[in-house]
Amino acid sequence: MHVLFVHPNFPAQFGHLALHLVEKLGWQATFVSQTPGEHAGGIRKLQYTTNGGATAQNHFCSRTFENAVWNTDGVFQACKAAGGSLKPDLIVGHSGFGSTLFLPELYPGVPVVNLFEYFYRPHHPESDMDFRKDLGWEVPEVNYLRSRCRNAMIMLDLEAASAGYTPTEFQRSCFPKTYQPKLRVLFDGVDRAVYHSSGDELRGEGVRRVAGREVPAGTRIVTYVSRGFESMRGFDIFVRAARLILEKHPETVIFVVGTDRHAYGGDELHVAPQKTFKEWTLARWPVDGRVVFTGRLGREELGRLLAASDLHIYLTVPFVLSWSMMDAMSCGAVVLGSDTAPVREMIRDGENGLLADFFSPEEIAEKAVAVLRDPRKYRGLGRAAEEMIAGRYSLEAVVPEMVGMFEGVVKGAGG
């Protein structure tokens, strides 16, 4: 079988899957993205470009759709230029970018499977837009208007796709009930070759060297990972909790992995005179050198850090669940997560992790310090988390389900 994967980035959510199909099943895989290169581990790559995009002349609410259409056109033109050398049996894309919408014009009868990550909902108790009322920041009215338009390409993909899937039950619940039967819940898959525990050899009492730093014997390690340091991922709440943790348990080093950027946007409207939410937060709640900002880490280095962590803290508003939390669980870390819907789906408080009120740095710190004072007492939570990931959310567990879905869709289209 020949699968055509479509995503602006590579490898994104599909790279590991494409490689598995090529190496383990002998399938063909072509990956269309904006990244250069002709091949990657047996995967044929095609690069597409966009010849336009949204400008100030477009209505603010329609710019997301405008950009998605240009992405769609870029993919269409790149595949068209490939001519007869590209004959897929199945197309797999990421909805929202609009990348697969035009391809049935090139490949009539070829089924399309889309990954659906999120459906935007304004004015909802579990909406990312409404959740952070504690900040006192007024969401501009036009943002609510735009949120009603941001689903336009997603709706087109829902109609056009032969089948779809979404990583978690929470994410599926965000979609209109009319379309939920069309969506299977399949997580992207955690790479256990990278994210796994190291027994007690790293989580010991001796000296540990992680992320380029030597941690003295007896010092606890706390980790926090986020692509960008933002209000959506509770960075300010985390910093306030970190200050309390260090006050109550001084022999602690807190590694913060990520970059000082706005990945999802919105914070930049409110943080002046500071430029970023990180700067805004640290201007109000400074931290000392025991909080180490590592920048981005490679997968292997991040895996080693998470495997050495005595406690991993993950906070999020109701939104797409981060890979980092699942990676930490896969590494056997004790994860202390926010008591919000996407996290509750994975963490059962006191069984395979801990939950705390998103809005309470005091509760987060109290539970964190309890773990740091007696980490061995809580390691069973990490072991249970790792077992859950290995059994249900690892690549080994997920890929056969993906393959079954793909084969079923192709068989149904051919029948």
Image (cartoon, grey):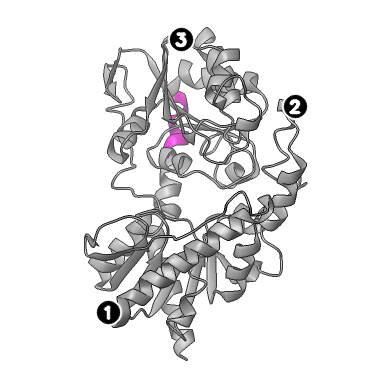
Q: Which residues are magenta?
A: 377-383
Q: Give the residue pinned by disc 3.
A: 288
User: Magenta segment, principal secondary structure?
Assistant: helix
Q: Looking at the picture, how far across and down is residue 358, in whole percent?
A: 64, 31
Q: Position of residue 140 (x, y in %)?
A: 74, 39
Is residue 94 visible in the rendered structure shown here? no
Say few, some or many: other residues with alpha carbon within 10 Å of mark 1 (under 14 / 14 to 19 / 20 or more).
few
Specify whether residue 407 is in view: yes
Residue at image location 47% in from the left, 15% down from the top:
373
Mark 2 residue crowding within 10 angstroms, few (<14) / some (14–19) / many (20+) = few
Say if the magenta span includes residue 379.
yes
Marks 2/3: CA distance?
Answer: 27 Å
Q: Name the quadrant containing residue 15.
A: bottom left
Mark 1 vs mark 2, CA separation in Å: 56 Å
Where's residue 148, x and y in %? 72, 55
User: Residues at badges 3 and 1 in contact (C-beta under 8 Å)?
Assistant: no
Q: Is 191 in the magenta?
A: no
Q: Nearer the viewer, residue 80 or 347?
A: 80
Q: Name the foreground residue: 402 vs 310.
A: 402
Regarding mark 2 in the picture, which secondary structure is present there?
Answer: loop
Q: Disc 1 or 2, which lies upstream in sequence?
A: 1
Q: Amino acid at mark 3?
A: Asp
Residue in front for this viewpoint, 85 or 382: 85
**Label 2 vs 3, first from the N-terminus:** 2
Q: CA distance from mark 3 to mark 1?
A: 58 Å
Residue of label 2: 136
Q: Amino acid at mark 1?
A: Ser
Q: Could you say which quadrant of the image residue 348 lies in?
A: top right
Mark 1 secondary-structure assignment = helix
- Specify the label residue 85 is tagged with: 1
User: 376 above or below 386?
Assistant: above
Q: Amino acid at mark 2?
A: Gly
